[in-house]
Amino acid sequence: MEQSAAVEHVLQAWRANPFQVDDESRALADAATRAWPMDEVAAGLLRAGDVTRAKKLTLALGHKAACQPDVDANDVQAAMPERVFARLPRPRSSYLRVVLAAGRCHAALHALEGGSAPMARLRRQVWAACFGHSLRRALEMERVIRDHDVLLLGETGTGKELVARALLAGTPGDASGQPAPSASLNAAAVPETLIESELFGHVKGAFTGATDARIGRIRTAHGGCLFLDEVGDLPSTTQVKLLRVIETNEVHPLGSDATHRADVRYIAATHKDLEAMVEAGGFRQDLFERLAGNVIRLPPLRERPDDIPAIGEAFVASYVGEGLTRDDDVDQLRRWLRAPETRAYGWPGNVRELQNAIRNLMLGLDAGLRGGAAGVAPSAAEADGLPDPIRRGAASLQTVRDWYVGRVLESAQGNMTVAARILGVDRTTVRRYARSRIEPAVSARSPAPDPS
């Protein structure tokens, strides 16, 4: 294998999104690193004056090392030898913190169960939300990425919190390479009277019961990310104050005139239809637009039935490890996970409902599913073009809207003006509704070439 070809194989596999790379490309990259001492190759590129290619190769080598199982920071540093950095434009720590974040993000996304096309697309989208289309872009455009907030949309039980953890893990930390600061808050789980104290903090004596000062979740996440779950449940007055904090990067604790810096990336999540709430006046449009810098939609379980056995096996394995079942029970449960009736069920409760069904079966109970006398719903085949979950009244409002908008656009032959007239909304709203139908196709394409 020639040296130039070896470098290209490593860059192809590890410069960009690892969830867009096939097994053959990874195998070629492994062979390249065995055939050539890549640290010497990178040093040679620098001596030849090819700093850009040397930087790409250094990041790729660090990324490859960081994505291996059971790796630590010392292993990654060894893959990025210090002598190479003498002529690179940034200190070694700048590269190290990015590749370590990429490794953490890779591990978190790899841990998500399911290998279906919707899950593959989700992994690509989440990694891109953290690093753009390449690690070099992440290194040079970190400020843009930090200012680009993420909104996770999905039904209850689709795994929004797990995806948020991957986004948190993918945020580069300080020069040591440690994870960035993070905090989380479920807006639906905190009383309305306390939500602002939890977010913004308070000084001692700010209100009855404030016996101690608190810095709040936003300041806790300074320099990293705040995960705001169930953002659709934020009170309207809190929405106004949160928007101000996001726009100014400054927070004022309750009861204090002091101003504190709060450089935070916001990851918001909800199962509600925020766009419909905006139109109805239940959620501020300016806050929605700020949070929806990068919208990631999580697929419901009914859209990825091929993942049911893998998800179920993971639950079973966790319980088998505790000695709660016998082998024959496990075998019967595995057959149930692969049964056509199980795959055909609509799963309105998504993964949480699947977990509850597995627990029921392990206890010798009926699965407890919501359709059919035996706990199995009718076939998911469409009747008269109407998806089964919608026909059964088991679909979310967002699912119904997305399906109907698609149907109207098809009947209007893609004409946004005609579709807007039928739907009774403006063209901008139709375009926003249609975005979720367009973005998956775009994200499935190969990454754009690095312009640098």
Image (cartoon, grey):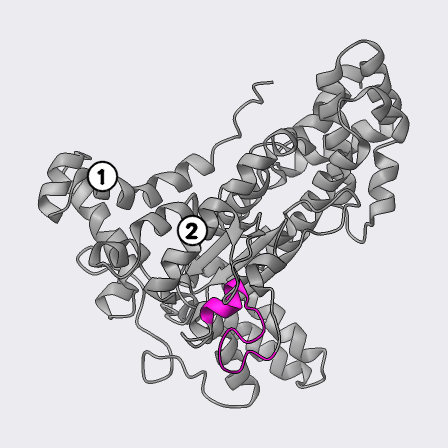
The residue to which callout 2 is attached is 244
The answer to whether marks 1 and 2 mark residues whose Cβ atoms lie closer than 8 Å is no
Q: Is residue 124 above or below residue 251?
A: above
Q: Residue at x 53, y 30 (%)?
A: 447
Mark 1 to mark 2 CA distance (whole Å): 26 Å
Q: Is residue 129 above or below residue 226?
A: above
Secondary structure at numbered mark 2 = helix
Q: Nearer the viewer, residue 217 or 390?
A: 217
Q: In the figure, residue 427 lies in which quadrant?
A: top left
Q: Percent x, y for residue 243?
A: 41, 52
Q: What residue span does the magenta drawing correspond to? A: 195-211
- Does any portion of residue 4 appear in the rendered image? yes
- Horizontally, residue 244 falls left or right of residue 52, namely left
- Horizontally, residue 346 falls left or right of residue 355, namely left
Secondary structure at numbered mark 1 = helix
Q: In the figure, residue 333 lies in which quadrant?
A: bottom right
Q: Which mark is residue 428?
A: 1
Q: Percent x, y for residue 121?
A: 49, 45
Q: Main secondary structure of the magenta part?
A: loop
Q: Residue furthest front?
A: 257
Q: Which mark is residue 308?
A: none
